Image (spheres, rainbow, N blue to C red):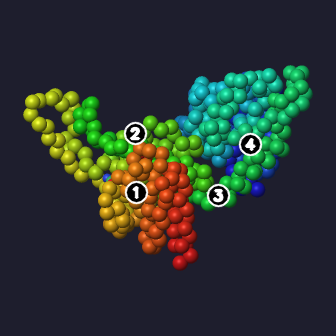
């Protein structure tokens, strides 16, 4: 069933490394492309040659041993993987990745990948039960890592208890199950581009114009799209929010930067959702030195930024284009006018003067208008619920288009 999915198997050092050899062999036999990465300590148990022979691929160990000058191996592998498996996963590696360390090729690659990660721990029972190991695993679970529980029984160290690496068959079952579930997700195979947060338009080295957008709406959209199986690129203005798990995040500052990044990704996108609050104006002149205060009033001449969404509307081919409209009055009129003028498929209108709706908070209340005349109104609910509603609308709209 594997359909040539790419599995990056990260092997860390423990006696269970011998089982990882069998796992490599069985994954390859089932049609997965397997590439293996090993830590120094894993190589003390089994040689890389074993894994190279079983996977029919080179084995990676050293971040600085760049064999191909046209690429950067750990980034290329991070991008190549459809799934990353850490088996066996030692307490040390679990601790490193839970704390964002990157001092070897595996931990560095794990920070760089947006692929799902499955962790199969193997260690002594007391190590497995140690509060710091438990806390690290809980933290990884929050980041979206999946765990394949170790088995119980006689451990190599002589203890009886939990800590034995899950059998290769069980690990493969979990991998197969992941791909089966993924294939059933409604947005599988789609590339969704989402913009979020404010932009900052520089006045001088210490000042800028911005707005109250926190990015929460756009980040909620990115999380929901990722959970529905899409490949998500989030282009974010400055926010205090962490990168959503499994999402490619590109951080920008100004409207101009956002314009360039969005345009670059447009062709490969199936759906674009512009929830960012992009500045409409930028200072005509950016001062290289800090403006000194004077006793007189200060005027700063502003010029229009480029309307990114409008440009996307002009260049639209196969993409479904979703805009937001942040309004304080005549919401329906202005939202519908944007739907038309910017050549959108869907517009999500929020009345940002209503309590609990729009900027900064955790909730929103929207009315969604489709180009096909469909209209749906939400209650005041969490931004995550709004995001789900937006994707339900996109699915309904695209289904209607393909049925025509
Ligand atoms: O980030 P949060 O704190 O969670 O707040 C969420 C939000 C209020 C920012 C969000 O729900 C929202 O309404 N986003 C759009 C804000 C906005 O800029 O609306 P607008 O009506 O000014 O712009 C209409 C559309 O054109 C938007 O999709 C906007 O991204 C786009 N635009 C605007 C100007 C510009 N130069 N380029 C654009 O692409």
Q: Earlier in the sequence, mark 3 or mark 1?
A: 3
Work out whether residue 14 or residue 137 is closer to the camera in this orientation and state it.
137
Mark 3 surroundings: few (<14), some (14-19) or many (≥20) residues within 10 A: some
Numbered disc 4: secondary structure: loop
Query: Residue 54 placed where, x, y %?
Result: 79, 40
Q: Is residue 65 at least partly visible in the picture? A: no
Q: Answer left or right for 120 relative to 262.
A: right
Numbered disc 3: secondary structure: loop
Residue placed at 33% from the left, 47% from the top? Answer: 255
Asked whether the residues under the numbered discs 3 and 2 touch, taking CB atoms below 8 Å apart as contact, a structural biologist would say no
Q: Answer left or right for 300 relative to 127.
A: left
Q: Does the closest atom of ligand 1 sit within 8 Å of the Cβ of label 1? A: yes
Asked whether the residues under the numbered discs 3 and 1 touch, taking CB atoms below 8 Å apart as contact, a structural biologist would say no
Q: Report, in whole angstroms, how far the alpha carbon at label 4 lies from the one at label 3.
A: 31 Å
Q: Which callout, 2 or 4, points to the residue nearer the camera?
A: 2
Work out whether residue 135 or residue 127 is closer to the camera in this orientation and state it.
135
Q: Which callout, 1 or 2, points to the residue nearer the camera?
A: 1
Asked whether the residues under the numbered discs 4 and 1 touch, taking CB atoms below 8 Å apart as contact, a structural biologist would say no
Q: Earlier in the sequence, mark 1 or mark 2?
A: 2
The circle on residue 350 is: 1
Mark 1 surroundings: few (<14), some (14-19) or many (≥20) residues within 10 A: many
The circle on residue 56 is: 4
The circle on residue 185 is: 3
Q: Report, in whole angstroms, how far the alpha carbon at label 2 lies from the one at label 4.
A: 44 Å
Residue 142 to residue 229: above or below: above
Residue placed at 14% from the left, 41% from the top? Answer: 299
């Amino acid at each position: 069933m594997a359909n040539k999915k790419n599995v990056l198997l990260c092997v860390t050092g423990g006696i269970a490394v011998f089982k990882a050899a069998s796992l490599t062999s069985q994954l390859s036999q089932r049609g997965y492309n397997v590439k293996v990465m090993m830590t120094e300590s894993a190589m003390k148990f089994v040689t890389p040659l074993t894994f190279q022979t079983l996977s029919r691929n080179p084995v990676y160990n050293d971040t600085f041993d760049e064999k191909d000058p046209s690429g950067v191996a750990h980034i290329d592998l991070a991008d190549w993987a459809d799934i990353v498996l850490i088996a066996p996963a030692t307490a040390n590696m679990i601790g490193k990745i839970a704390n964002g360390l990157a001092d070897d090729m595996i931990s560095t690659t794990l920070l760089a990948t947006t692929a799902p990660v499955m962790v199969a721990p193997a260690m002594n029972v007391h190590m497995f039960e140690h509060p710091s190991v438990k806390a690290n695993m809980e933290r990884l679970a929050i980041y979206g890592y999946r765990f394949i529980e170790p088995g119980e029984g006689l451990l190599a160290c002589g203890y009886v208890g939990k800590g034995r690496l899950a059998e290769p068959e069980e690990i493969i079952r979990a991998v197969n199950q992941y791909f089966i579930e993924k294939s059933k997700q409604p947005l599988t195979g789609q590339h969704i581009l989402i913009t979020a947060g404010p932009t900052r338009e520089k006045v001088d080295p210490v000042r800028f114009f911005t707005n109250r957008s926190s990015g929460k709406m756009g980040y909620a959209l990115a999380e929901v799209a990722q959970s529905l199986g899409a490949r998500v690129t989030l282009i974010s203005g400055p926010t205090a929010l962490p990168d959503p798990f499994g999402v490619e995040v590109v951080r920008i500052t100004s409207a101009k930067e956002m314009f360039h990044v969005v345009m670059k990704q447009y062709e490969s996108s199936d759906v674009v959702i512009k929830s960012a609050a992009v500045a409409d104006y930028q200072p005509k002149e950016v001062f290289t030195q800090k403006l000194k205060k004077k006793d007189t009033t200060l005027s700063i001449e502003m010029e229009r930024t480029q309307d990114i969404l409008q440009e996307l509307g002009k260049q639209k081919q196969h993409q479904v284009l979703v805009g937001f409209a942040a309004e304080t009055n005549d919401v329906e009129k202005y939202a519908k006018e944007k739907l038309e003028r910017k050549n959108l498929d869907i517009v999500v209108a929020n009345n940002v003067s209503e309590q609990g709706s729009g900027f900064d908070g955790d909730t929103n209340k929207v009315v969604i208008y489709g180009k096909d005349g469909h209209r749906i109104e939400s209650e005041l609910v969490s931004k995550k619920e709004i995001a789900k509603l937006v994707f339900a609308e996109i699915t309904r709209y695209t289904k209607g288009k393909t049925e025509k």
